[in-house]
Image: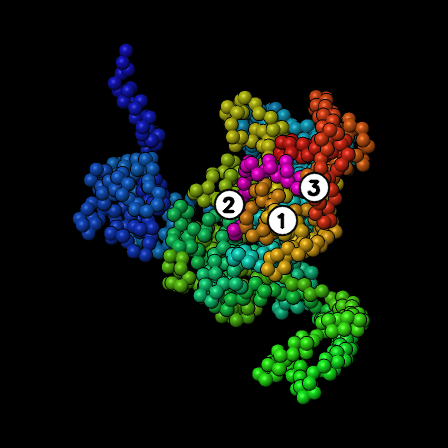
């Protein structure tokens, strides 16, 4: 039997036509349905560009009704087949460049024309230069933050599980789908989860025992408070901020990638601030405008003022090649620094891709090109392209007048010894010179002496020629004395060394001069702010209209900003300070939403807005918008306390859930958008390395200070170590010990843009170009190879095995249990213990018959274990470190 013809047609249409064509019919309008399509694909040539291609403007319906210069009808209301614009997009002729319209978009355009090309409201008589429609302003992310009521739950069992308002918001949506929270995770799972989450380190056996033995109702809450008070907390959560700030210890941009010797001061500022629970509004203001809060001149600074100036290095973190760029490339290089900095600021604070408006109006979000340059004008006086300061010229010395006076006194004392050394040196040189001149013809002795004693740059051509002909005179120096008379020269070099050593000892008493890479305005720029122009197509060599500083126009409807052009009574323009106060006033629609969403993302593995760096139209919509706004308002109400936000989140029932799947949840919410269970997360690169160091007993808890250096080893891998190659890049064979610094936390390892630590890069350490909004978690073959054969892994497995034996002895069962506890924070099951005992026995037997041959060991490193039992235990420990149970947090 053949199916009914009409059903066959419908079936075919359902297969081949876009789903949108069969949606419930509704009246399409230009503003709501069509304009977003035209803005994305067409406006850059037909409305918002510098010239209208073909004279066609698609921004208003009445413009579309005008025929082209060739007489074609661009759009005929009610008649799609007579509308040239529809035919061109159907045939793929338009747009000429870039992505073509999708079938669904073409269908929307066709239906709109067929329905009469309706608009929601009368069109403006003239199109404003900056035109943002009511629909664009109504987008959720640009609306004021609204603190809604905490939902009332219907299910009594759900009500009983509410610990914080977070639970009520999440359970309300789960109830709508017939779901609820998963059971609570066991204490060991929860301990490992929250400890790694808040400190980036696994719990110690002592911490496990203490927590498991604590049956008090508030045991977990007290655990959270202890973790938040740990200095490791700031290291962990400081690293998250350093990602979005684009922190690096080198300039990047060029192949030479010069080191930033003082960038670490900003890293330390971030960690200290997070540990001290500095209110985040203050934290942000200091980074945007700390210099404008400090009295000038920047001398004899208090600790608080030093912090404020150090914080502004946030605006100095992007790649910067202006010190090395050729004269003809300076304009481009300088502009790149400014544009990259704006990307960091806008993605960090606004969660918007503002940088897309540098060359033209943003295709998707209501950010016109002029807004990009208005935002740029806020920062222009600190950059001042015409009077550019290279990285070293921006450094501010922290040496006080008192320290300078002390340094001068010490130097004066050292100069006395230096004068004595030079006198002795000249005495020795004169003796040897006299000996050598006596070997020369008498008529040459005085001319040679005169030539030698004449300052090099003042020697005549005749003197230069004479010295060249007599190299034993020409090459005489304090360092070459021993070549003339080994006994005499060596003796007197030793005497000179006594003076040099004494000088060095004296100079050690000098106060160290420390610098910070601050962002400041010069007096000239503050008095006469450099103008900011819109660049044609983003080209800094084609300036057009001058603009004044301002926040994004779309935000000013609900959140007006007042950014001054200058502040005459102040030594700075005041632009950045006004902007900083505006974005942290608690009413800005983006700053707090973006911040709390990032914190949520790190706790749950996914933000309420999954695209943490893009709250725009191309980003993901919030799964729980009411919860996001409640969290943002609660954050402000709690005085911008990050620690209090952590407490609120990690003490919720939602956070304490098990990660186990259920059939009902997997069917209704397979991606766990509603958070009916906890998400399993893979630990990040730094946490992986730090956890291995902690478990092996090698972790060095030293905080702050200059970064631990990295170098390229003989295999071309970037490893921790002091680079001792010569100026030509050749290995010298010299080894400089790090005295335990090689075991410091990863946040203190040098972040060279061109030389990321190999072990961390393999596990998705981000490249700061210019910053990292969200980390990847890839699964690639080099990761397995690094864990199986990597030198770091093998070393840590060996140290791990040694620690186990040292702490519990050599009984296999006891060793396995202790190793399991160290690695996973729990005991092995009976089956796991049985399999592990068998593995150890098998490995021990293997190494007895086929022992590992010691390889060549680098200087400063211990060799591999040689006893079969230790070799077996080392391989077992390596297996634990490479297991999924270690790599993932449940």
- Asked whether 455 or 384 is in front, the reply is 455
Tell me the element at label 1: loop
Tell me the element at label 3: loop
What number is the disc on residue 714? 1
- Asked whether 130 or 483 is in front, the reply is 483
Q: Which residues are magenta?
A: 769-793
Q: Residue lying farthest top? A: 1
Give the alpha-carbon distance from disc 2 to disc 3, as whole Å: 47 Å
Q: Are marks 2 and 1 in contact (CB under 8 Å)?
A: no
Res 399 seen here: yes
- What residue does disc 2 label? 613
User: Of the residues under marks 2 and 3, which one precedes in the sequence?
Assistant: 2
Q: Are marks 1 and 3 in contact (CB under 8 Å)?
A: no
What number is the disc on residue 855? 3
User: Residue at left 67%, top 81%?
Assistant: 452
User: Residue at left 67%, top 75%?
Assistant: 475
Image coordinates of residue 881 in percent, x first then y, are 67, 35
Tell me the element at label 2: loop
């Amino acid at each position: 039997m053949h199916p009914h013809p009409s059903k066959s047609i419908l079936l075919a249409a359902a297969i081949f036509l876009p789903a949108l064509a069969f949606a419930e019919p509704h009246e399409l309008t230009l503003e709501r349905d069509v304009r977003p399509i035209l803005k994305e694909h067409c406006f850059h040539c037909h409305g918002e560009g510098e010239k209208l291609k073909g004279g066609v403007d698609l921004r208003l319906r009445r413009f579309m009704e005008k025929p082209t210069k060739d007489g074609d009808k661009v759009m005929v209301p009610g008649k799609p087949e007579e509308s040239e614009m529809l035919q061109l997009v159907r045939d793929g002729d338009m747009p000429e460049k870039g992505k073509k319209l999708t079938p669904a978009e073409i269908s929307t355009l066709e239906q709109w024309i067929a329905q009469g090309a309706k608009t929601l409201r009368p069109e403006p008589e003239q199109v404003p230069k900056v035109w943002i429609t009511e629909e664009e302003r109504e987008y959720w992310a640009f609306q004021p933050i609204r603190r809604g009521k905490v939902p009332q739950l219907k299910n009594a069992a759900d009500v009983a599980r509410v610990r914080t308002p977070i639970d009520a918001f999440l359970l309300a949506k789960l109830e709508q789908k017939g779901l609820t929270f998963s059971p609570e995770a066991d204490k060991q799972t929860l301990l490992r989860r929250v400890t790694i989450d808040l400190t980036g380190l696994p719990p110690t056996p002592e911490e496990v025992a203490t927590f498991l033995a604590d049956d008090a109702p508030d045991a977990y809450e007290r655990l959270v408070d202890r973790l938040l008070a740990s200095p490791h907390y700031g290291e962990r959560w400081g690293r998250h901020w350093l990602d979005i700030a684009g922190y690096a210890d080198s300039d990047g941009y060029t192949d030479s990638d010069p080191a930033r010797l003082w960038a670490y001061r900003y890293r330390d500022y971030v960690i200290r601030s997070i540990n001290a629970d500095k209110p985040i509004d203050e934290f942000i203001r200091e980074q945007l405008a700390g210099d404008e809060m400090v009295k000038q001149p920047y001398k004899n600074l208090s600790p608080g003022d030093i912090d404020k100036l150090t914080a502004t290095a946030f605006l100095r973190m992007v790649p910067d090649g202006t010190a090395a760029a050729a004269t003809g490339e300076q304009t481009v290089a300088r502009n790149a620094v400014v544009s990259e900095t704006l990307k960091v600021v806008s993605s960090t604070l606004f969660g918007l891709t503002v940088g897309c408006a540098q060359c033209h109006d943003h295709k998707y979000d209501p950010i016109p090109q002029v807004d990009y340059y208005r935002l740029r004008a806020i920062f222009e006086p600190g950059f001042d392209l015409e009077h550019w300061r290279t990285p070293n010229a921006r450094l501010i010395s922290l040496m006080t007048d008192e320290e300078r006076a002390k340094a001068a006194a010490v130097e004066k004392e050292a100069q006395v010894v230096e004068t004595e050394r030079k006198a002795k040196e000249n005495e020795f040189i004169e003796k040897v010179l006299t000996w050598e001149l006596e070997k020369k013809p008498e008529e040459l002795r005085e001319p040679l002496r005169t030539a030698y004693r004449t300052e090099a740059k003042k020697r005549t051509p005749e003197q230069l020629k004479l010295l060249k002909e007599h190299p034993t005179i020409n090459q005489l120096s304090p360092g070459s004395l021993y070549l003339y008379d080994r006994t005499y020269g060596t003796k007197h070099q030793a005497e000179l060394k006594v003076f040099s050593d004494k000088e060095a000892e004296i100079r050690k008493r000098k106060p160290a001069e420390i610098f910070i890479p601050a962002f400041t305005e010069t007096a000239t720029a503050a008095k006469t702010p450099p103008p900011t122009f819109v660049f044609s197509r983003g080209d800094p060599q084609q300036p057009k209209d001058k603009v004044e500083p301002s926040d994004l126009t779309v935000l000013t409807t609900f959140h007006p900003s007042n950014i001054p052009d200058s502040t005459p009574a102040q030594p700075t323009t005041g632009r950045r300070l006004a902007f900083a106060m505006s974005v942290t006033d608690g009413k800005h629609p983006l700053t707090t939403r973006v911040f709390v969403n990032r914190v949520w993302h790190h706790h749950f593995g996914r933000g309420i807005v999954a695209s943490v760096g893009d709250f725009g139209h191309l980003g993901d919509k919030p799964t729980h918008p009411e919860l996001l706004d409640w969290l943002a308002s609660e954050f402000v109400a709690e005085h911008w306390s990050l620690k209090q936000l952590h407490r609120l989140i990690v003490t919720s029932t939602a956070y304490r859930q098990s990660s186990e799947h259920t059939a009902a949840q997997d069917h209704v919410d397979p991606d766990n958008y509603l958070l009916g269970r906890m998400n399993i997360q893979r630990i990040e690169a730094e946490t992986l390395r730090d956890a291995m160091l902690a478990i092996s007993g090698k972790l060095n808890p030293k905080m702050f200070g200059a970064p631990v250096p990295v170098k390229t080893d003989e295999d071309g891998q970037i490893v921790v170590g002091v680079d001792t190659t010569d100026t030509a890049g050749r290995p010298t064979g010299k080894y400089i010990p790090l005295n335990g610094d090689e075991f410091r936390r990863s946040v203190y390892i040098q972040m060279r843009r061109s030389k990321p630590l190999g072990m961390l890069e393999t596990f998705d350490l981000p490249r700061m170009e210019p910053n990292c909004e969200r980390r990847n978690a890839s699964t690639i073959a080099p990761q397995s190879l690094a864990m199986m054969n990597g030198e770091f892994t093998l070393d840590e497995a060996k140290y791990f095995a040694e620690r186990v034996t040292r702490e519990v002895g050599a009984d296999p069962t006891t060793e396995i249990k202790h190793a399991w506890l160290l690695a996973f924070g729990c005991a092995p099951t009976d089956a796991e213990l049985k399999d592990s005992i068998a593995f150890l026995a098998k490995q021990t037997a293997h190494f007895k018959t086929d022992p590992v041959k010691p390889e060549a060991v680098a200087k400063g490193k211990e060799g591999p274990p040689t006893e079969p039992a230790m070799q077996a235990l080392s391989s077992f420990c390596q297996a634990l470190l490479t297991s999924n149970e270690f790599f993932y947090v449940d």
